[in-house]
Image (cartoon, helix red, strand yellow):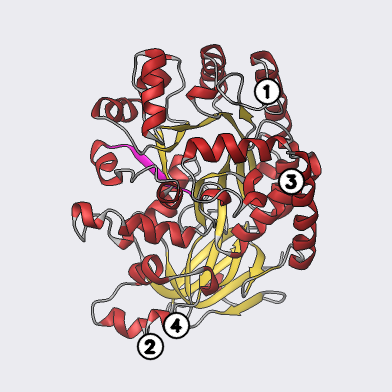
Amino acid sequence: MTRTILRGAHIVTMNADFDEFVGDLVVENGRIAALVRSGVRAEVARERPGDREIDCRGRTLIPGLVQTHLHLCQTLFRSLADDLRLEQWLKERIWKFEGALTAETMRVSADIGLCELSTSGTTTLLDMGTVHHTDAVGEAVDYSGLRAFIGKAMMDEGDDIPASLRETTAESVRESLALADRWHGAAGGRIEYAFCPRFALSCSTSLLRQVGEICASEGYVMHTHSNETEWEVQEVGRRWQDTNIGYLHSVGLLGPRAVLAHGVHFVDDERAILRDTRSCVTHCPSSNLKLASGIADIPLLWKWGVRVGLGADGAPCNNTMDGFQEMRLAAMIQKPIYGPTAMPARRVLQLATRDGADVLGLSHEVGSLEVGKSADLVLLDLQQPHHGIDGEAADALGGSVYARIVYAARPSDVRSVFAGGEEIARDGVSLKYDTAELHARGRDALTQILSRR
């Protein structure tokens, strides 16, 4: 089999010891076969006939980014729902747009989102779809080469939900089970299924209980929104006389495979439940800022022992799916509250890589550069003007490669992206997608959606 050898990179492993060194990384059969420091003679890193060698001198190699909350179904709605609070954003714009999607336009939306993610360094994701057309998302992920959890949004009750999205409890559960049968373990295991009740206020208690029972019995990931806005928290309290997390716990949704998006407005009793159930939270700083939802207290969640991942959320509330921007914001917004050391750069890069893998139960596959793991790799050029004249010289004077990545890196710094050992992007250009064709498909799809909403 052809091997790929990345020569002379600054390898930032993100392993438990945070090893970093200049050396070679060998990819074979889609996995990391060897990591060899420069100056060490190793048979495994010697060139063989048919090998592909990439000169990575002056470049930095990191694990592929892991995003634990996205909405590929919303990619086409970017810049169509700006400067609104969440309740308006959902009821006046997004739910109507989602209800106007067809299988064909959903595929276009997912393709555009996956192209953006793959060229900007994200190689693993957890996606929540809309109520319909989830097969189109699975087909798009299969083509992309990325690793993903997918799931249809489940919505069987709630105020102002359009008829195009409303479903019965039985329909929601039946379709989710059928989708799980089709997609869980698909694409050689790259695709897994997640049950996705949208949030407490759009789901009946019966639906939530059934999802909890299925996930507990079968080990599926359960993905929902929780504690995003004060309005949501107050409404849950009014309806069920409980906290949001207390209610979700009472219906059996929480546990090690539960991933709750946002978590902006928790009280200590809720943090204790999250800790005790080993449930996970996804931090979405750009979305929470743009929708004015607030700032999630990540240092406090860590203090309580709650596991946290990082995600960009959907394109209309961001308006980008750039994982580097999410890292920068995650680090910066806590500093006025807790001080300059609250979210150090190395810890934030861990949040976007190894922690995300842990949240998804994929630590054995992704999140760090270690022998045996999937070769999900991002090669960066950190020698651009916005990084300073000589980053390595700065590091020698007390600088940090982690700081250069978290505070200054951009998608334009991405030189190559590998997913499962396959190079899927090079110098900002997708090797999977024709971007001009995608643009044309997107324009036609959006015209259809706007005519149907």
Q: Quadrant of the N terminus?
A: bottom right
Q: Which badge, 1 or 4, comes first in the chain's sequence?
A: 1
- The answer for how far apart the CA atoms under marks 1 and 3 are is 31 Å
Q: Which badge, 2 or 1, comes first in the chain's sequence?
A: 1
Q: Nearer the viewer, residue 238 or 56?
A: 238
- Give the labeled residue for mark 4: 383
Q: Is label 1 or label 3 in front?
A: 3
Q: Is residue 258 left or right of residue 207?
A: left
Q: Is label 2 or label 3 in front?
A: 3
- Give the labeled residue for mark 1: 177
Q: Amino acid at mark 3?
A: Leu
Q: Is residue 305 left or right of residue 177?
A: left
Indicate which disc residue 450 carries. Answer: 3
Q: Which badge, 2 or 3, comes first in the chain's sequence?
A: 2
Q: Nearer the viewer, residue 141 or 159?
A: 159
Q: At which x and y percent is residue 103?
A: 79, 40
Residue 39 sits in which quadrant? bottom left
Q: Secondary structure at mark 1?
A: helix
Q: Amino acid at mark 4?
A: Gln
| Vertical placement of residue 187 versus 247, above or below | below
- The answer for how far apart the CA atoms under marks 4 and 2 are is 7 Å
| Vertical placement of residue 397 versus 328, above or below | below
- The answer for how far apart the CA atoms under marks 1 and 4 are is 49 Å
Q: Secondary structure at mark 3?
A: helix
- The answer for how far apart the CA atoms under marks 4 and 3 are is 43 Å
| Number of residues whose C-alpha sits closer than 10 Å to that of mark 2, classed few (under 14), some (14–19) or many (20 or more) | few
Q: Which residues are magenta?
A: 305-311
- Give the labeled residue for mark 2: 389
Indicate which disc residue 448 carries. Answer: none
Q: Is label 4 or label 3 in front?
A: 3
Q: Is residue 333 left or right of residue 154?
A: left
Q: Amino acid at mark 2?
A: Ile
